[in-house]
């Protein structure tokens, strides 16, 4: 079976990836700057150390590049650190991968690449973040992800290595209520991200993908026609698509939600990968219903 190397293996996404990729029968090789205990081969490596990366790529077939700083680090890390880790680090991983002759690369990007394109054109409108929208990053995190995508595109052209850039919604850990409501605001469960990554590897392995950029977020049924109500009060829209959702939320202390300005279509990922999120808002409502003691500590729960 093919060998898959995961960078950022100690992080939230890395930990979600390990059981899914291993469970599909792949041999794993893990890389992170932080030490972890694992039954799989692990290398404590800083991705800024190019010389240390090259030897561990020997025999690797696919790379999942999940290491890097995220949006939550914007208040604690400098732009220079973002540039160094997210761009120089990505270059080092890509260069070592290309020189090793890998068969495919998954770059974990972000919906932050859309930046200014996420602003609704009117007060009663919402934005559907499709993959063909202009990319106008509004912070250093989004900029590094945008440039990471361009770097990946270059390596596809230069070396012929198939690659997939996954523009991920928010997946950092949150308490139960914040996590569930966040699924309506562009969030995604890390377990669903792991499935999208697995399907990306399988598609490249089958020769079905050379280069793709795909949104990966939780599935929501919203349309642009829902815009005026989503911007004013999302609860009636939830009532339209999710039976008894509003009554259930009110029983648990949710009296209102903040306006929703955008949603993230995932139809392209469904078409190219067969991706359908399992841990979506419908799943969360079922979990909520099965736990009568779950109540929101904050109204609205998100953000």
Image (cartoon, rainbow, N blue to C red):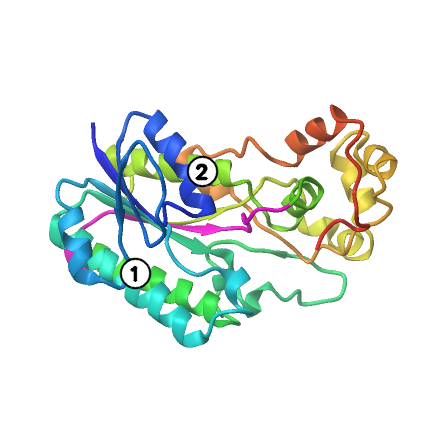
For the image, the number of numbered tags is 2
Residue at the image position 75 percent from the left and 49 percent from the top: 301
Q: Is residue 27 left or right of residue 298?
A: left
Magenta-drawn stretch contains 170: yes
Q: Real-space Cα distance between discs 2 and 1?
A: 21 Å
Q: Secondary structure at mark 1?
A: helix
User: Which label lies toward us, 2 or 1?
Assistant: 2
- Asked where in the image residue 27 lies, by quadrant, the reply is top left
Judged from the image, the secondary structure of the residue bearing numbered disc 2 is helix
Q: Is residue 231 above or below residue 247?
A: below
Q: Quadrant of residue 146?
A: bottom left
Nearest the eye: 208 or 12? 12
Q: Quadrant of the N terminus?
A: top left
Which residue is label 2 attached to?
A: 16
Sequence-first tag of 2 and 1: 2
Q: Is residue 211 visible?
A: no
Q: Which mark is residue 90?
A: 1
Q: Which mark is residue 114?
A: none
Q: Which part of the image, by quadrant, shows the C terminus?
A: bottom right
Which region shows up in magenta?
Answer: 158-174
- Whether residue 291 sits left or right of residue 53 in the image: it is right
Between 242 and 48, the residue placed more toward the observer is 48
Measured along the vertical axis of the image, is residue 212 above or below residue 21? below
Viewer-nearest residue: 102 or 92: 92
Q: Residue at x 47, y 37 (%)?
A: 270
Q: Is residue 81 visible?
A: yes
Q: Is residue 128 left or right of residue 157?
A: right
Give the left or right position of residue 137, taking residue 18 as reference: right
């Amino acid at each position: 079976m093919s060998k898959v190397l995961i960078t950022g293996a100690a992080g939230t996404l890395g930990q979600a990836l390990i059981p899914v990729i291993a469970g599909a029968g792949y041999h794993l090789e893990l890389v992170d700057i932080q030490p972890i205990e694992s039954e799989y081969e692990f290398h404590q490596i800083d991705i800024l150390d190019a010389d240390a990366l090259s030897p561990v790529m020997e025999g690797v077939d696919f790379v999942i590049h999940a290491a890097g700083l995220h949006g939550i680090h914007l208040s604690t890390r400098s732009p220079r650190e973002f540039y160094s880790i997210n761009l120089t680090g990505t270059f080092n991983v890509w260069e070592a991968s290309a020189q090793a002759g890998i068969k495919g690369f998954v770059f974990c990007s972000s919906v932050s690449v859309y930046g200014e394109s996420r602003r609704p054109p009117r007060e009663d409108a919402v934005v559907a973040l499709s993959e063909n929208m202009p990319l106008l990053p509004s912070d250093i995190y989004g900029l590094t992800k945008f440039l990471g995508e361009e770097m990946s595109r270059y390596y596809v052209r230069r070396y012929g290595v198939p690659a997939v850039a996954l523009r991920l919604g928010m997946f950092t850990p949150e308490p139960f209520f914040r996590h569930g409501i966040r699924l309506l605001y562009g969030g995604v469960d890390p377990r669903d991200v792991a499935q999208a990554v697995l399907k990306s590897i399988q598609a490249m392995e089958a020769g079905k993908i050379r280069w793709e950029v795909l949104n990966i977020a939780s599935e929501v049924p919203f349309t642009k026609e829902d815009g005026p109500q989503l911007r004013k009060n999302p609860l009636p829209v939830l009532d339209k698509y999710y039976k008894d959702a509003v009554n259930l939320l009110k029983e648990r202390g949710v009296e209102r939600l903040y306006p929703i300005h955008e949603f993230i279509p995932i139809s392209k990922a469904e078409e190219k990968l067969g991706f359908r999120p399992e841990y979506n808002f419908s799943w969360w409502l079922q979990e909520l219903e099965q736990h009568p003691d779950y109540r929101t500590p904050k109204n609205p729960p998100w953000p």
